[in-house]
Amino acid sequence: MSRALRVTRTKAGLVGLIACVAAAAGFLSSTEDRPAAAPRPAPSPSPSAAPRTPEPTLPAAPAPPGLPVIDYWTAPRGFPADPASLALRTLTEGLHPTRSIAVYDAPGGRPRARLKPEISGMPLVLPIADRRSGWVAVLLPTVNRRIGWLPAKGWSARPLRDHLIVQRRTHKLTWRRDGARQAVWTITTGTAATPTPLGRSFVLGRTPTSGSVFAGLDALALSSVPDDRRSLPAALRGAHTGIHGWFNDDAFGRSASNGCIRMPAAAQRTLLKHIDHGTVVTVVD
């Protein structure tokens, strides 16, 4: 974030907007539900490992009424950490909810929240991170490094071709498509006090910006949020991370933002042309 992401109300409804101020409610408060620390990458399985026996499909418990909806402001509670948050493996499939669907904390586990087809007016596409017992695990929005589990109903599959990899120490962003490197750019990342969140997140959608500092270009709103909201002014604590253009070339190659990723204008135009909903963004050191 240069300052942070917000949303505003229009006649058409809620739309994501970067003017880099936000008001939010319902974020994680319990120790159990604080953003999970980024784990070490899981080791690759041995090529000689025996093939797995197919697991039986586990049934889904009925979702009770009144489950909270995961939206732009409200973080999910009680979901497990992403066990491969720092993995650089490209996720090639996502899903789009076709109706309001319950999200569970494990295959055949407890339903804890709901997802709707849109989030702040942007079609929601969730990267699929794992499959087990007839269920799929997806990366969750509005919380960092958490996954939720869905049964095989209420969604349609979407292919994912792209992967954005951000290296905080070298201030580089690499764009891969179908596993092949397309471009590498020098960028701005968050300061030590307001770092760009580590781990896997994904693109929620394209959102307008306000102010010439953004080089007159739209931004890409991400699913990730500040790891330490107390380090930000109160008006910014409901912010989402964004990828956006920046007017000053002198800013690149530095840790200078409130967590957002600042891009050269030409690079931002390229991302806006090619990067779609659900694209995974992996931030590593």
Image (cartoon, rainbow, N blue to C red):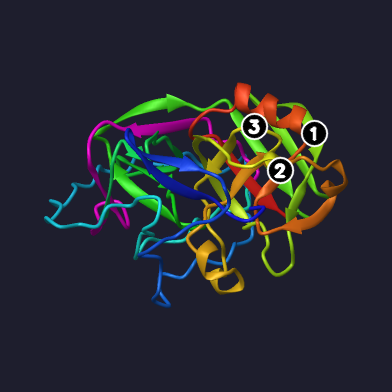
Instruction: Tell me which residue sits at (69%, 39%) in the image.
Output: 212
Whole-number angstrom distance, CA of label 2 to CA of label 3: 9 Å
Q: How many numbered marks have been drawn onto this rendered protein structure?
A: 3
Badge 3: residue crowd in 10 Å (few <14, some 14–19, many ≥20): many
Badge 1: residue crowd in 10 Å (few <14, some 14–19, many ≥20): some
Asked whether 85 or 220 is in front, the reply is: 220
Task: State if disc 3 and disc 2 touch (CB < 8 Å).
Answer: no
Residue designated by label 2? 213
Boundaries of the magenta span: 88-112
Q: Amino acid at mark 3?
A: Leu
Q: Return the disc, 1 or 2, that comes first in the chain's sequence.
A: 1
* Circle on res. 184: 1
Tell me: 207 left or right of 154: right
Whole-number angstrom distance, CA of label 1 to CA of label 2: 22 Å
List x then y, in percent, for residue 174.
74, 36
Q: Return the disc, 3 or 1, that comes first in the chain's sequence.
A: 1
Task: State if disc 1 and disc 3 touch (CB < 8 Å).
Answer: no
Asked whether 24 or 254 is in front, the reply is: 24
List x then y, in percent, for residue 218.
59, 33
Instruction: Tell me which residue sits at (62%, 48%) in the image.
Output: 87
